[in-house]
Image (spheres, rainbow, N blue to C red):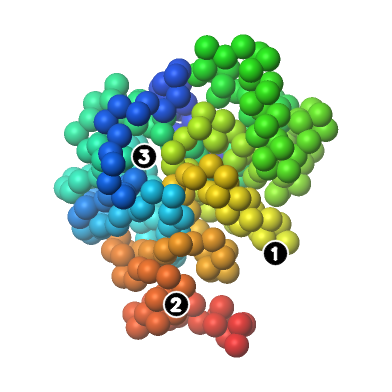
Amino acid sequence: MMSMFEEQLHSMVPQMSEEGPSKEGASTNDYMIEVDNIKKTFGNGPQILKGMSVNVQRGETLVVLGGSGMGKSVLMKHIIGLLKPDEGSIKVDGEEITTMGPTELKRVRAKFGMVFQNAALFDSMSNYDNVAFPLREHRKDMSEADIDKKVRSLFDMFTLDADIHGRQFPSELSGGQRKRVGLARAVALDPQIVLYDEPTTGLDPITTDQVDQMILDAQKALKVTSIVISHDIASAFNIADNIIFVYYGEIIARGTKEDMLKCEHPFVQEYFKTWIDKNK
């Protein structure tokens, strides 16, 4: 079953460019994502984002930590253009997206790939067809032979066998293998940015290590910019170039693992206490 967030992002798939990510408007600065003082309130409820700002460098892996309901997923929805802020600016590859209409957003969204918490694969499709799906839908210029070559290269990249795992269905794979198929599908259209929504939730420690390595390998091989929403401290420390800690719609700590552990905010100290005790 897909979450509401997954369903919203799946609904965006037909909007992506058939020619893949466009270079139109591409920026030459060092930042792939620039979020400046964004604020968001839903209806008469409390303010969810309270002037949040963060820049993500090209090729960087940024991990977004924080407790449940603190605004992490709302931030990600703004970055991909599912939500517009009440105030503030969001630039993707140098382009301001908060003022874009649907047609412009289609083009910008083609720069993103998405890896969901539960992989969100199509259960009725083989794993091969899951990876081939975005190519068949959005790359009408590719022949089936070209698609087969691309799919097989993606299976190889993520240490899967196209003739064995590809013929199977998602239900026949382990959790870690499903994640790898999900990432192969996410990068099939050669995105510049990959977003991960809780990629290690519910996984055992060995599989979590495998998923962490998968994220690191993808970043190295594909030179993508990665943003990872997580609750997993060990995983965050393993994969992050930088970390931000979100607390009720504000970023209260940012930087490296060492910066997180030095943070004096009481909630941050409590959040890391168990990890610190375990690793003394």
Q: Residue at x 57, y 14 (%)?
A: 142
- Category of crowding for the residue at label 1, using alpha-carbon neighbours closer than 10 angstroms: few (below 14), some (14–19), many (at least 20): few
Question: On residue 250, which mark appears?
Answer: none
Residue at label 3?
80
Give, as a three-letter code, the residue at label 1. Answer: Pro
Q: Residue at x 31, y 50 (%)?
A: 30
Q: Position of residue 131 (x, y in %)?
A: 63, 29
Q: Taking 36 as reference, is 267 left or right?
A: right
Q: Secondary structure at mark 2?
A: helix
Residue at label 2?
258
Look at discs 3 and 2 and give the one toward the viewer: 2
Q: Secondary structure at mark 3?
A: loop
Q: Quadrant of residue 248?
A: bottom left
Q: Give above or below for 4 relative to 279.
A: above
Give, as a three-letter code, the residue at label 3. Answer: Ile
Residue at label 1?
205
Q: Marks 2 and 1, Cα distance to the nearest angstrom?
A: 23 Å
Q: Give above or below for 267 relative to 107.
A: below
Where the N terminus falls, by quadrant? top right
Q: Is residue 69 visible?
A: no
Where the C terminus falls, by quadrant? bottom right
Q: Marks 1 and 3, Cα distance to the nearest angstrom?
A: 30 Å
Q: Position of residue 49 (x, y in %)?
A: 27, 55
Q: Earlier in the sequence, mark 2 or mark 1?
A: 1
